[in-house]
Image: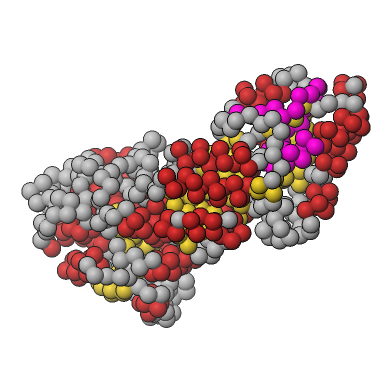
């Protein structure tokens, strides 16, 4: 099991060895984000920018003007909250060829607490015109996204997670915009993104064991630009859509799925599971996932409760 | 509007890296014309800033008509010098100078702030070739310029980056992030120019010793010492004196430097128009016809008639 941050760093080093225009800027979190791997391998392409994220973002935009492909590494929350204005004006509005490696997203951030957890980043970044927002589910998908981002000319936000991530079962090769079906199933579909997708697959198995209903599980690696037809094809013929994300239920994947479905009729019921409009806290991963209803067991329980409500439709 | 009144076409053009120079009198004339274009364009568009564009005009004119290695016919050439107008609300000053320099027709100034215009209220580099930076949200330009200077050096290009900051703008904390890192990377190909006109939009209570009708943003603070302590070379000049401006720019670009340079330019908000000078209320404003007539006289352009 490789973490996304390790997959990101290793893939970036491999690409940057072949392309010296790829550089990495760090806001002094390299030992956490694994940017130090890059710094050790390619010191001439690594630039320390100090604990000053806004300056780093703007400097990256300037570097891109001279033909470089600057990646930046920090914690997600320091990009999407602290450095949002330069991301808006100097990166998104100018379509600068800048890549944001947003580490430590979600709530599983190594006992740091709500100050360092980012549970709004998808909502914030996907509201920004011109931004590509990617949320890999495992190391292999993350590596594909890094390689894709290095070829793509424009801003990319890559949502990374801190801890070791099990591999997605049966994920399709990454294709920007497309969603992939992880588990075949019936009239209820679970939609997830990032490393939460694997936990959602595990929850689906528990639901099947306890209720006899086999939910379909769909993974959405591209938050923006989403191929809406690809998503809707996966949701065809279901009565209940349960969106699960390690993120606020406001504006993230749940918001996205709701927006897509509400303009299409007939539309299935959409339930959004995630952080219910509150901040996180510092605690061991298992406790956080249980408390916020994101562990396979907690998820299975809430999904089953919705099945009971809709039992007539899902028996 | 037409530029025929300004003797631009007969003045020698400075090619990229060329050595040709214009006379101080010619630069004065360009700046006066650009001031007129700015206040009259803002009046026609019924929106825009006046005081800041006028205080920065001589500094911008000297860059585009003397110092910068640029070619309006090839605005995207990668070896060019870069100019970042970090105080983006002074956009009309930059547009006026760029039009006179030949980046686009002076007539296009009439589209300023109009729908679909290339001349946005704040500079949008995606719309207008020759604009090196988008700006407007204050405090970000020096960081962007720092990245430009770093990129030029890493790519082995002899391109100098010039960043204009407002004296109010440098209250933004992000500016000081850039000040710290630029010195650490010894970016000798980066020059910051602070348009120190002593006023901001509303600003601070005056104490009787201020140049303007409100308090100077940096009253009691030795800005030169602050920059020097961060490792910058500091040049202090009168921002309306072309011999001083040109000399400062030469010094800033000079070889054998290992530090970024800041030019602290003492300027007058509303410079050149009698009723606007030192008046915070002219931060932005719409001149009446009577005021426009007066401006033309003040600028020594009463010979050119209605533009």
For the residue pair A70 and A11, the one nearer the viewer reads as A11
Q: Which residues are magenta?
A: A178-202
B272 left or right of B149 in image: left
> What residue is shown at x 32% (from left), y 70% (from top)?
B259
Say if the magenta span includes residue A198.
yes
Is B257 rendered above or below residue A9? below
B46 left or right of A284 in image: left
For the residue pair B269 and B70, the one nearer the viewer reads as B70
Residue B264, x across and y down, in percent:
32, 71
> What residue is shown at x 82% (from left), y 41% (from top)?
A296
Res. B189 in view: yes
Residue B220, x across and y down, in percent:
42, 81
Res. A91 in view: no
Say if the magenta span includes residue A217.
no
Is A113 rendered above or below residue A232? below
Which of the 4 image quarters holds residue B52?
bottom left
Which of the 4 image quarters holds residue B225?
bottom left
Residue B297, x across and y down, in percent:
19, 57
């Amino acid at each position: 099991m490789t973490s996304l941050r390790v997959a990101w760093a290793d893939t970036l080093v491999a690409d940057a060895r072949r392309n010296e225009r790829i550089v990495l800027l760090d806001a002094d979190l390299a030992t956490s984000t694994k940017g130090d791997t890059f710094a050790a391998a390619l010191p001439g392409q690594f630039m320390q920018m100090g604990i000053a994220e806004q300056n780093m973002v703007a400097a990256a935009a300037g570097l891109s003007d001279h033909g470089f492909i600057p990646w930046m590494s920090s914690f997600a929350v320091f990009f999407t909250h602290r450095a949002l204005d330069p991301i808006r004006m100097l990166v998104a509005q100018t379509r600068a060829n800048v890549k944001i490696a947003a580490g430590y997203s979600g709530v599983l951030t190594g006992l740091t607490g709500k100050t360092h957890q980012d549970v709004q980043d998808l909502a914030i970044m996907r509201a920004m015109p011109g931004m590509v927002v990617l949320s890999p589910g495992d190391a292999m998908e993350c590596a594909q996204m890094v390689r894709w981002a290095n070829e793509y000319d424009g801003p990319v936000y890559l949502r990374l997670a801190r801890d070791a991530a099990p591999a997605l079962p049966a994920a399709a090769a990454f294709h920007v915009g497309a969603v992939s079906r992880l588990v075949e199933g019936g009239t209820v579909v679970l939609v997830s993104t990032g490393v939460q997708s694997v936990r959602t697959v595990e929850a689906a198995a528990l639901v099947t064991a306890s209720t006899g209903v086999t939910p379909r599980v769909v993974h959405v690696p591209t938050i923006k630009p989403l191929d809406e037809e690809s998503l809707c094809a996966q949701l065809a013929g279901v009565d209940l859509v349960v969106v699960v994300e390690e993120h606020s239920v406001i504006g993230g994947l749940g918001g996205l799925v709701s927006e897509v479905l509400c303009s299409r009729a007939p539309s299935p019921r959409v339930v959004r599971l995630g952080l219910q409009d509150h901040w996180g806290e510092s605690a061991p991963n298992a406790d956080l996932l249980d408390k916020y209803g994101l562990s396979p067991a907690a998820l299975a329980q809430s999904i089953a409760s919705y099945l009971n409500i809709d039992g007539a439709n899902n028996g | 509007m037409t530029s025929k009144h300004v003797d631009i076409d007969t003045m020698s053009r400075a090619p990229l890296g060329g050595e040709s120079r214009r006379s101080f009198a010619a630069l004065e004339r360009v700046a006066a014309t650009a001031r007129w274009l700015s206040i009259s364009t803002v009046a026609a568009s019924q929106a825009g800033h006046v005081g800041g564009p006028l205080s920065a005009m001589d500094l911008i004119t000297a860059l585009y008509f003397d110092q910068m290695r640029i070619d309006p016919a090839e605005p995207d050439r990668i070896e060019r010098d870069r100019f970042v107008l970090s105080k983006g609300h002074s956009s009309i000053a930059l547009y006026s100078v760029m039009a006179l320099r030949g980046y686009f027709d002076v007539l296009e100034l009439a589209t300023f702030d109009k729908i679909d215009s290339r001349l946005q209220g704040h500079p949008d580099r995606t719309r207008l070739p020759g604009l090196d930076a988008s700006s407007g949200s204050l405090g970000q330009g020096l960081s962007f310029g720092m990245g430009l200077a770093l990129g030029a050096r890493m790519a082995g290009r002899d391109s100098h980056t010039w960043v204009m900051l407002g004296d109010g703008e440098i209250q933004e904390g992000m500016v000081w992030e850039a000040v710290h890192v630029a010195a650490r990377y010894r970016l000798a190909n980066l020059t910051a120019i602070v348009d120190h006109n002593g006023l901001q939009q509303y600003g601070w209570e005056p104490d009787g010793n201020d140049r303007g009708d409100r308090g100077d943003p940096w009253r009691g603070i030795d800005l030169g010492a602050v920059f020097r302590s961060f490792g910058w070379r500091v040049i202090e000049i009168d921002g309306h004196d072309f011999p001083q401006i040109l000399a400062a720019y030469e010094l800033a670009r000079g070889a054998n430097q290992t530090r970024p340079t800041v030019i602290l330019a003492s300027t007058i908000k509303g410079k050149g128009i009698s009723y606007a000078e030192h008046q915070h209320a002219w931060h932005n404003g719409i001149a009446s016809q009577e005021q426009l007539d007066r401006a033309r006289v003040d600028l020594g352009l009463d010979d050119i008639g209605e533009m």
